[in-house]
Image (cartoon, rainbow, N blue to C red):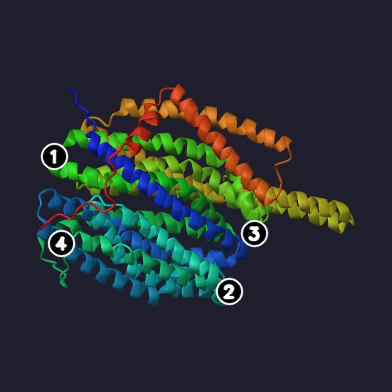
């Protein structure tokens, strides 16, 4: 049996291309602000105890937001809410929105209160059992401040879902920019009087700005709100029924996150921070590409699913995946190639060579997770658009089991290799010291420090945790694509494989160009130079890589590279605020 695969209409494609570009620019702006935060934070805290405490304190609040205040809910809410809009039942849509907002805020308030009360136990026994008593106390205080922001995000995340369902992305795109501006304010002005707690208060301010900027959009679409929970509303029950498996699936994500933090906390001071810095650098291209495309395509998939238009739904998903492949594969290769000089910019602040080795050890394995996580953003949403939240749940469980096995095995290898190396190093050092060979003892200790650092930075150290993170998304992605192909009859796999192969070839050409160019810069003395030269080196290599990839991609027949600019730049720009429908 053959299945036709119709492309989305030209209007659909142009709208998605422009909205994706809008989100990429907005997310890029937010990441630029976040990068400014990163340099200031690195210069003050580096890879050490205080930043370990902040990163750990944010684990529980961010997981509450992910599970309840927007993360899980948007996947269940948008398909049902979009169904009301597709059938022009705006009164039913606003009743549903009111019930969901009120319910989510109530549940988030209860969870935040529990987190506030039991913060000491959560930190000491769940999130970071390897922390000292002083570090635990600091983490608890930070967590209690950050829980305030979860209450704000529980409602603000719903605002994003409502505006996305109307295919309006401007104000939701501005929201994360203002959130980062709030944090930047805390970093720039509150660290002095409050220390690391100033960053937490900046996050609370950013959450308030994230909320406020979206209110005009809701007024534009004439949102109605009723102060009732509406737990007997069949539509709300449908959202809850769809949400429960998604919450459970994100609970698996939370479990994975806690496993990473738990293991990293046992690897000594700086391991949690190094894992977080590597993730932050990886998250920049992933957000610009995967999250942007996922946000844009999801309401379209949900609408096509509600209308039963399977051909346009498959076409929209296929186009989104091809765009992600073309963008993420060179991004992953580039991050590995220029990651070391990029991290060395942070050394100008508070990082030393060993800190940088830890961060780069994680970044190398995070980099290829960009591809899998970005593809996962769209493939998982294809199930949610069909109102199936159970299938992604059990695939997440399978991946979580694999993650525990991978991380557990690598951690045991870390312990055995690290301890064995340490015993050999300090045994040799002790023998030389006792014999009076102080110069030899010093040389042995120096050589041993380098060997120990290699153990930590390599596959059995923080890099192993990053490998487990990336492998989790790869396993889920493979399972979901196999199921989706059987269910839809086709996922346009021939075009996807062709695009992937051509993109890999173009990325290989790009990688060779970057390596040759960097070797030339090294011959000119640009390696181990000052901060300005290093920044120019990173920008220059990134530019050379991008130009080389585009040229190679066009020569290899990647048609999307030629057609995307035409779609985005075509005349007839949509209004920033589409006309509000009449009730």
Mark-to-mark CA distance, 3 and 1: 55 Å
Residue for point 34% across, 72% down: 112
What residue sits right under mark 3 in the picture? 349
- Residue matched to label 1: 308
Q: Residue furthest front?
A: 571
Given residues 461 and 78, the one toward you in this image is 78
Res 247 seen here: no
In the rendered image, the quadrant that contains the C terminus is bottom left
Which of these two is toward me, 352 or 474?
352
- Residues marked 1 and 2 touching at CB (< 8 Å): no
Q: CA separation, marks 1 and 2?
A: 57 Å
**Camera sees residue 214:** yes
Does the CB distance between marks 3 and 1 fall below 8 Å? Answer: no
Name which of mark 3 and mark 1 comes first in the sequence.
Answer: 1
Q: Are marks 2 and 3 in contact (CB under 8 Å)?
A: no
Q: Earlier in the sequence, mark 1 or mark 2?
A: 2
- Residue 286: image x %, image y %? 43, 46
Q: Is residue 395 above or below residue 9?
A: below
| Residue pointed to by mark 4 | 94
Q: Earlier in the sequence, mark 2 or mark 4?
A: 4
Label 4 sits on a secondary structure element that is helix
State the residue position of label 2: 192
Crowding at dot 1, Cα within 10 Å, few <14 / some 14-19 / many 20+, comes out as: few
Q: Residue shown at 49%/59% (left/top)?
A: 261
Between the C-alphas of marks 2 and 3, the distance is 17 Å
**From mark 4 to mark 1, how far is it between C-alphas?**
23 Å
How packed is label 4: few (under 14 Cα within 10 Å), some, or many (20 or more)? many
Q: Residue at x 27, y 37 (%)?
A: 13
Residue at position x 18%, y 45% from top?
Answer: 303
The residue tagged with tag 1: helix, strand or loop? loop
């Amino acid at each position: 049996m053959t299945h036709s695969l119709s492309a989305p209409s030209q209007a659909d494609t142009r709208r998605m291309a422009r909205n994706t570009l809008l989100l990429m620019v907005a997310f890029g702006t937010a990441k630029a602000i976040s990068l400014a935060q990163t340099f200031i934070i690195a210069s003050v805290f580096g890879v050490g105890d205080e930043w370990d405490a902040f990163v750990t304190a944010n684990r529980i609040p961010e997981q509450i937001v992910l599970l309840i205040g927007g993360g899980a809910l948007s996947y269940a809410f948008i398909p049902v809410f979009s169904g009301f809009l597709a059938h022009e039942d705006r009164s039913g849509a606003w009743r549903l929105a009111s019930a969901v907002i009120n319910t989510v805020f109530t549940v988030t308030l209860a969870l935040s209160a529990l987190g506030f009360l039991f913060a000491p136990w959560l930190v000491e026994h769940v999130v970071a059992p390897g922390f000292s008593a002083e570090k635990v106390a600091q983490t608890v205080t930070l967590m209690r401040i950050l829980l305030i922001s979860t209450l704000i995000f529980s409602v603000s995340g719903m605002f994003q879902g409502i505006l996305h369902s109307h295919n309006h992305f401007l104000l939701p795109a501005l929201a994360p920019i203002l959130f980062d501006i709030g944090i930047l304010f805390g970093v720039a002005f509150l660290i002095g009087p409050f220390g690391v707690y100033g960053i937490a208060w900046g996050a609370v301010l950013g959450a308030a700005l994230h909320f406020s900027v979206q209110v005009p959009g809701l007024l534009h679409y004439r949102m109605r709100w009723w102060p009732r929970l509406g737990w007997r509303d069949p539509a709300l029950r449908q959202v809850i029924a769809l949400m429960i498996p998604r919450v459970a699936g994100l609970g698996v994500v939370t479990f994975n996150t806690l496993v990473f933090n738990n293991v990293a906390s046992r690897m000594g001071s700086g391991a949690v921070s190094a894992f977080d810095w590597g993730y932050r650098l990886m998250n920049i291209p992933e957000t610009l590409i995967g999250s942007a495309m996922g946000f844009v395509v999801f309401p379209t998939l949900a609408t096509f699913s509600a209308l039963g238009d399977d051909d346009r739904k498959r076409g929209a998903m296929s186009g989104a995946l091809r765009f992600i492949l073309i963008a993420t594969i060179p991004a992953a290769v580039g991050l590995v190639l220029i990651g070391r000089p990029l991290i060395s910019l942070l050394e100008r602040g508070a990082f030393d060579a060993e800190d940088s080795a830890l961060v780069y050890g994680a970044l190398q394995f995070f980099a290829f997770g960009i591809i899998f996580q970005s593809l996962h953003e769209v493939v998982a949403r294809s199930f949610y658009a069909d109102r199936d939240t159970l299938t992604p749940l059990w695939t997440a469980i399978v991946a979580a089991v694999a993650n525990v096995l991978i991380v557990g095995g690598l951690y045991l290898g870390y312990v055995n290799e690290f301890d064995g190396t340490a015993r050999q190093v300090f045994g040799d050092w002790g023998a030389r010291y006792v014999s009076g060979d102080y110069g030899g003892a010093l040389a042995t200790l120096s050589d041993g420090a380098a060997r120990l650092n290699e153990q930590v930075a390599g596959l059995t150290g923080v890099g192993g945790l990053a490998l487990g993170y990336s492998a989790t998304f790869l396993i889920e992605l493979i399972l979901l694509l196999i199921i989706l192909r059987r269910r839809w009859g086709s996922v346009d796999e021939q075009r996807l494989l062709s695009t992937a192969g051509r993109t890999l070839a173009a990325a290989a050409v790009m990688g060779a160009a970057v390596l040759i160019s960097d070797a030339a810069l090294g011959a000119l003395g640009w390696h181990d130079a000052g901060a300005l030269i290093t920044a120019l080196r990173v920008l220059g290599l990134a530019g050379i890589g991008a130009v080389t990839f585009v040229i190679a991609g066009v020569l290899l027949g990647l048609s999307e590279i030629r057609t995307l600019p035409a779609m985005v730049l075509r005349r007839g720009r949509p209004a920033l605020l589409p006309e509000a429908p009449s009730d």
